[in-house]
């Protein structure tokens, strides 16, 4: 299990991480969310000692991380890094060997991953001859080739087409099922909600929420109500206390209600005002939760 | 994973990448062709040498013809003129003739060094004229001036070309290290690598890989030259082959010294555009070492300053092989230079290794040297 414990880092006067703690257990896929500049990349780089923390520590199975542990980690940085004039297959195998694989094992694993990621026909091409999406796949293969115990991916979905997104999501699922701890950052909240069970949300270098996506949604102080009415007076809103308008679009009202508000009362008020065509009530989506948490 | 295995992997990658680009292959081939051509050149041009010989009058009849008959198989011609003894001697002193033949004293006099080829030609001719077939030489070769230690053209040329080859290869392969480091930094691949590899192993692998290529090139060129020299294909003393062979180990030492500095310079630059300006201090040091050595050796290769530059670590790799070709370098000086240079490499690897490690992960504007050293002390 990866544990980041009270990590603190300042760049000059700017705090990048403040007392930041969270964990990624093996076999789990954890989405790492936060607005731009929240400290996600700094936290990920700290795992690989690419930034030195001012305070706090990064632990793997309870122990500080050294080079021998990091050989069992896989990392895909946000700014992709591969040798531009080196053939893809050779390059992926090279990273495998740097992580301790034998020459034969590295070649076999490289070929397997390139096939899995639909890059097998580009094995002999230099990296700089590949499209952006294919370079991303090659980078992913380089992070995965040695079957890492921990996989850290910074914005792995950025710039991928929907098909590639699906392939990558499947790969990450399989890696977690194999027993790897998977941590990846993303801005695509719908996607994260769809593919991972747990998230860490970070804002201004502090963890503002961490845990199961469903739990977090349920624990939110708000519930969302979507309501479509026919024949209601224009500008109608339920007079129920604790209910606020989020937006009104295409005849649908989206309302935020405090958790203790009884939805039946809102529904009853709506039925008095007109014919209810649609009524839904539930915890906020991950995206709504994210906005709620990071804009406070 | 062991450090040695990591370093080997990294060095191999460097070698494979450079070989893929073919610059190495073509430049090596070109230089080998040039050396080979220089060796083959004398076969294509008329190298017949004409000797001017003064004979103390009177000259025996048939001597001039006998001289030229003896000279022909040795690719030479002899022009003979008779002078009174004092006039002949004056002409030799003034370097107007190559030798003076004094048959009354059975002597052949040269100015300051004996030319064995001319000696043999004249001796053979005299035997023919006198009708002798005895084994002992007819003539005693003598010189009229003390031998000075000035170097021959071949020695100067060997020293000059050898030092230039070292300067060129150290600069070119050093630049490869520099740009390699900056490129790795600029395209961020370094982050993926140092996540799993210690920076000093990355540095060592890179320097060793590129250095081996340079060593191969110098060994091929130096080796071919040394073989051609030893085979007598060049018009030069065969002993110069040893000085040429010295280029190989001294390339390794000089390269190690300067390449580590180039790597540190590369690590404090962030963008490829900064690479050459970052490497400037190292390049200037290398050039200064070359020109200082060149000037001091051309003035007097045996001066105290020349001795000093032979063992001073920054100049030793360029000066030692050159001085060895010019005037020879005693064994103790070889040993001392080796120890001093190795100690400097060790110290530099430690310092530059830390600058490299600290600079690698830093992006943004280029650091100045002082800031880089501060960073190395307190990363």
Image (cartoon, coloured by chain):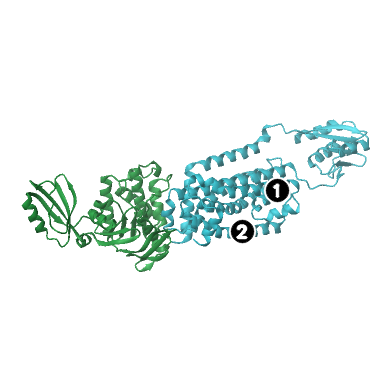
Residue drawn at 79 percent across, 42 percent down = B116
Based on the displayed image, in which of its 4 quarters is residue B55 positioned?
top right
Which is more N-terminal, label 1 or label 2? 1
Residue positioned most to the bottom: A62
Q: Nearer the viewer, mark 2 or mark 1?
A: 2
What label sits on residue B344 in the rendered view?
2
Q: Chain of mark 1?
A: B
Q: Position of residue A51 (x, y in %)?
A: 42, 59
Q: Position of residue B96 (x, y in %)?
A: 85, 35
For disc 2, the neighbor class at 10 Å (few under 14, some 14 to 19, many from 20) is some
> What is the C-alpha distance between the residues marked 2 and 1?
25 Å
Q: Position of residue B125 (x, y in %)?
A: 84, 36
Looking at this view, is A99 or A78 the one in front? A78
Looking at this view, is A37 or B191 the one in front? A37
- Residue A214 visible somewhere in the drawing: yes
Based on the displayed image, in which of its 4 quarters is residue B124 positioned?
top right
Query: SS of the residue at dot 1?
Result: helix
| B251 sits left or right of A159 in the view | right
B232 relative to B377, above or below: above
Looking at this view, is B153 or B341 the one in front? B341
Q: Which chain is green?
A: A
- Residue B59 visible somewhere in the drawing: no
Callout 2–callout 1 Cβ contact below 8 Å: no
- Is there one chain holding both mark 2 and mark 1? yes
Query: SS of the residue at dot 2?
Result: helix
For chain B, the rendered hue is cyan
| B196 sits left or right of A161 in the view | right
What label sits on residue B325 in the rendered view?
1
Looking at this view, is B366 or A195 the one in front? B366
Q: Chain of mark 2?
A: B
């Amino acid at each position: 299990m990866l544990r980041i414990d009270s990590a603190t880092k300042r760049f000059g006067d700017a705090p990048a991480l403040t007392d930041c703690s969270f964990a990624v257990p093996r076999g789990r896929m954890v989405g790492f969310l936060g607005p731009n500049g929240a400290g996600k990349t700094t936290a990920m780089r700290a795992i690989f000692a690419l930034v030195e923390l001012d305070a706090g520590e990064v632990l793997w199975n309870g122990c500080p991380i050294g080079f021998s542990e990091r050989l069992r980690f896989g990392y895909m940085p946000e700014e992709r890094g591969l040798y531009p004039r080196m053939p893809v297959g050779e390059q992926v195998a090279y990273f495998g060997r740097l992580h301790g694989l034998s020459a034969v094992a590295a070649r076999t694993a490289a070929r397997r991953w390139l096939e899995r990621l639909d890059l097998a026909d580009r094995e002999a091409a230099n990296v700089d001859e590949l499209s952006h999406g294919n370079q991303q796949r090659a980078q992913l293969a380089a992070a995965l080739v040695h079957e890492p115990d921990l996989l850290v991916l910074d914005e792995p979905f950025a710039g991928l087409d929907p098909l590639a997104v699906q392939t990558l999501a499947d790969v990450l699922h399989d890696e977690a099922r194999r027993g790897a701890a998977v941590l990846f950052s993303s801005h695509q909240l719908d996607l994260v909600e769809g593919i991972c069970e747990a998230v860490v949300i970070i804002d201004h270098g502090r963890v503002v929420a961490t845990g199961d996506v469903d739990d977090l949604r349920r624990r939110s102080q708000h519930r969302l109500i979507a309501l479509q009415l026919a024949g209601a007076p224009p500008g109608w809103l339920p007079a129920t206390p604790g209910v606020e308008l989020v937006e009104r679009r295409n005849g649908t009202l989206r309302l935020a209600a405090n958790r203790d508000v009884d939805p039946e009362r809102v529904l009853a008020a709506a039925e008095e005002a007109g014919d209810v065509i649609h009524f839904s009530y539930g915890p906020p989506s991950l995206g709504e939760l994210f906005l709620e948490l990071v804009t406070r | 994973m062991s450090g040695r295995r990591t370093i080997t992997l990294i060095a191999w990658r460097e070698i494979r990448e450079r070989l893929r680009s073919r610059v190495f292959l073509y430049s090596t081939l070109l230089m080998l062709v040039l050396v080979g051509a220089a060796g083959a050149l004398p076969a294509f041009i008329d190298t017949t040498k004409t000797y001017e010989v003064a004979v103390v009058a009177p000259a025996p009849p048939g001597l001039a013809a006998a001289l030229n008959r003896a000279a022909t198989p040795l690719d030479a011609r002899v022009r003979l003129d008779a002078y009174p003894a004092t006039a002949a001697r004056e002409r030799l002193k003034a370097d107007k003739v190559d030798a003076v033949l004094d048959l009354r004293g059975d002597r052949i006099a040269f100015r300051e060094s004996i030319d064995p080829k001319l000696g043999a030609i004249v001796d053979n001719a005299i035997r023919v004229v006198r009708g002798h077939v005895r084994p002992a030489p007819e003539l005693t070769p003598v010189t009229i001036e003390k031998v000075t230690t000035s170097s021959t053209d071949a020695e100067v040329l060997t020293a000059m070309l050898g030092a230039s080859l070292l300067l060129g290869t150290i600069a070119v392969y050093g630049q490869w290290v520099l740009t390699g480091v900056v490129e790795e930094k600029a395209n961020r691949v370094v982050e993926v690598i140092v996540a799993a590899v210690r920076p000093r192993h990355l540095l060592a692998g890179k320097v060793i890989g590129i250095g081996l290529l340079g060593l191969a090139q110098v060994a091929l060129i130096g080796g071919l030259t040394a073989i051609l020299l030893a085979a007598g294909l060049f018009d030069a003393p065969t002993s110069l082959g040893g000085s040429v062979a010295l280029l190989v180990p001294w390339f390794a030492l000089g390269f190690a010294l300067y390449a580590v500095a180039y790597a540190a310079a590369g690590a404090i630059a962030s963008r490829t555009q900064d690479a050459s300006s970052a490497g400037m201090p190292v390049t200037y040091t290398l050039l200064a070492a070359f020109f200082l050595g060149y000037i001091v050796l051309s003035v007097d290769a045996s001066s105290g300053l020349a001795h000093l530059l032979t063992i001073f670590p920054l100049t030793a790799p360029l000066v030692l092989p050159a001085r060895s070709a010019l005037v020879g370098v005693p064994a103790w000086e070889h040993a001392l230079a080796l120890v001093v240079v190795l100690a400097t490499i060790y110290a530099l690897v430690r310092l530059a290794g830390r600058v490299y490690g600290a600079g690698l992960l830093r992006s943004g504007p280029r650091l100045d040297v002082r800031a880089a050293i501060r960073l190395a002390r307190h990363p």
